[in-house]
Image: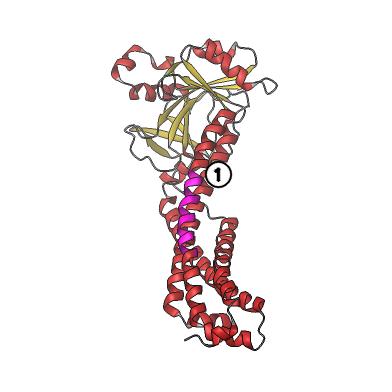
């Protein structure tokens, strides 16, 4: 209570200082929650691509077609256990409806081509795609199913065509959540329609693939198999799971660094505000401190009390910043939940770190003014006006 009473003697100054810390912690909470979500995407993506080699055309990774005839050449290479040709096209034919999260895609494949090596997806409603399925049928990822409000037995439009929903998948927190799986031949038709007219006229739909997913023998070196694929298939690029993790992980690390920098700048401003507030407090209470020193008050007690005041300022600012950040995170997630765009993940670890950091920041910022107050000469302090 005594600490609160001391802070209430300087209401405006204390309020402004708390506000500065609140803004810093708010930015830390929001940006850290965004980083948490991105890191979870990266981790899930690493699991998804583990044990795979993605082969695409070398001119533009995954955006230009690779002839499906390359499947036989790749399958014949030593160390290759399974080959899964796939076609991936945007969910929307005109590119509209894109969001900041994982892009929505339509993937055409041959069920079972991965020989059981692929990422295991659990069915929520209906059933998975089978080799016997043909035509305009689809199995939807969890986010797409939620966005369009459909389950097995329903219908959804893809590229202006009605597709019968055979089933929906359980959420994975990775790219399968925004992916629609269709028969390979159906996706090849959709893919051919997206190509430039000159290219489309030169190829038949059955000749097209956008990527070939290769599953190497776990006992062999995936990098060596990838190199052999690039040597065998002309103008191809083979990306291993380790390379995917390295590329995407480095991008996430840069983003995390930017987030930390932005939050650090805000918190430094808040720390300087605490130093200013406590310095002014010491100046206003110089005579009081002199009296306490004159009657035998120990220096460490004065330091302890002033540091505790600064820590309380940091704690209050941290709690307010956390509350404000949590409100922003919840509102933003709810606004995007219907479209599957959940961009923030506020974890207990992030919340505890934010409050603890603000409290420690306040205490550290209060040490210098507190130490200066404890070193005041009692006689000089008593004469202070």
Q: Main secondary structure of the magenta part?
A: helix
Q: From the viewer's perspective, is residue 302 above or below residue 24? A: below
Query: Camera-side residue: 254 or 248?
Result: 254
Q: From the viewer's perspective, is residue 148 above or below residue 80? A: below
Q: Quadrant of residue 297?
A: bottom right
Q: Position of residue 153 (x, y in %)?
A: 46, 39
In the displayed structure image, the side of residue 63 where residue 244 appears, left or right:
right
- Most extreme residue toward the right is 219
Residue under the point 33% across and 33% down: 160
Q: Position of residue 317 (x, y in %)?
A: 50, 68
Query: Camera-side residue: 162 or 49?
Result: 49
Element class at badge 1: helix
Residue under the point 68% across and 20% down: 220
Instruction: Look at mark 1 in the image and give the residue it sits on.
Output: 40
Q: Position of residue 33 (x, y in %)?
A: 51, 52
Q: Let me know if residue 260 is in the magenta part.
A: yes
Q: Quadrant of residue 170?
A: top right
Q: Position of residue 117 (x, y in %)?
A: 63, 27
Q: Let me know if residue 20 is in the magenta part.
A: no
Query: Camera-side residue: 126 or 80?
Result: 80
Which segment did they paint magenta? Answer: 255-271
Q: Crowding at label 1, few (<14), some or many (≥20) Cα neighbours within 10 Å?
A: some
- Most extreme residue toward the left is 197
Residue 354 visible, this orientation? yes
Q: From the viewer's perspective, is residue 365 above or below residue 241? A: below
Q: From the viewer's perspective, is residue 67 above or below residue 2? A: above
The quadrant the N terminus occupies is bottom right
Query: Camera-side residue: 339 or 364?
Result: 364
In the displayed structure image, the side of residue 98 where residue 108 appears, left or right:
right
Residue 344 visible, this orientation? no
Residue under the point 48% across and 16% down: 236
Residue under the point 44% across and 68% down: 19
């Amino acid at each position: 209570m005594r600490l609160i009473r001391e802070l209430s003697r300087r209401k405006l100054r204390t309020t402004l200082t708390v506000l500065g810390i609140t803004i810093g912690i708010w930015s830390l909470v929001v940006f850290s929650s965004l980083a948490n979500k991105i890191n979870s995407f990266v981790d899930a993506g690493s699991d998804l691509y583990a044990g795979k080699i993605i082969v695409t055309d070398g001119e533009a990774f995954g955006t230009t077609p690779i002839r499906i005839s390359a499947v036989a050449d790749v399958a014949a290479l030593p160390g290759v256990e399974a080959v899964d040709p796939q076609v991936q096209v945007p969910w929307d034919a005109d590119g509209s409806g894109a969001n900041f999260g994982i892009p929505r895609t339509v993937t055409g494949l041959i069920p079972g081509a991965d020989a059981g090596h692929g990422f295991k997806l659990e069915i929520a409603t209906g059933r998975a795609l089978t080799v016997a399925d043909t035509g305009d049928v689809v199995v939807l990822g969890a986010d797409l199913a939620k966005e369009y409000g459909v389950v097995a037995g329903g219908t959804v439009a893809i590229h202006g065509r009605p597709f019968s929903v055979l089933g929906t998948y359980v959420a994975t927190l990775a790219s399968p959540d925004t992916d629609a799986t269709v028969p390979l031949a159906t996706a090849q038709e959709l893919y051919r329609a997206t190509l430039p007219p000159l290219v489309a006229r030169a190829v038949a739909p059955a000749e097209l693939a956008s990527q070939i997913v290769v599953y190497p023998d776990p006992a062999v070196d995936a990098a060596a198999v990838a190199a052999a694929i690039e040597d065998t298939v002309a103008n191809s690029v083979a990306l291993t799971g380790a390379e995917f993790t390295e590329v995407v992980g480095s991008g996430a690390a840069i983003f995390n660094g930017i987030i930390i920098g932005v939050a650090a700048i805000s918190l430094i401003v808040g720390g300087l505000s605490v130093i200013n507030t406590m310095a002014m407090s010491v100046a206003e209470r110089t005579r009081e401190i002199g009296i306490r020193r004159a009657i035998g008050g120990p220096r460490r007690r004065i330091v302890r009390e002033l540091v505790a005041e600064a820590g309380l300022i940091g704690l209050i600012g941290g709690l307010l910043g956390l509350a404000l950040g949590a409100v922003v995170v919840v509102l933003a997630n709810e606004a995007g939940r219907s479209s599957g765009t959940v961009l923030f993940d506020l974890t207990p670890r992030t919340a505890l770190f934010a409050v603890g950091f603000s409290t420690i920041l306040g205490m550290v910022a209060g040490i210098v003014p507190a130490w200066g107050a404890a070193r005041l000469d009692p006689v000089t302090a008593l004469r202070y006006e």
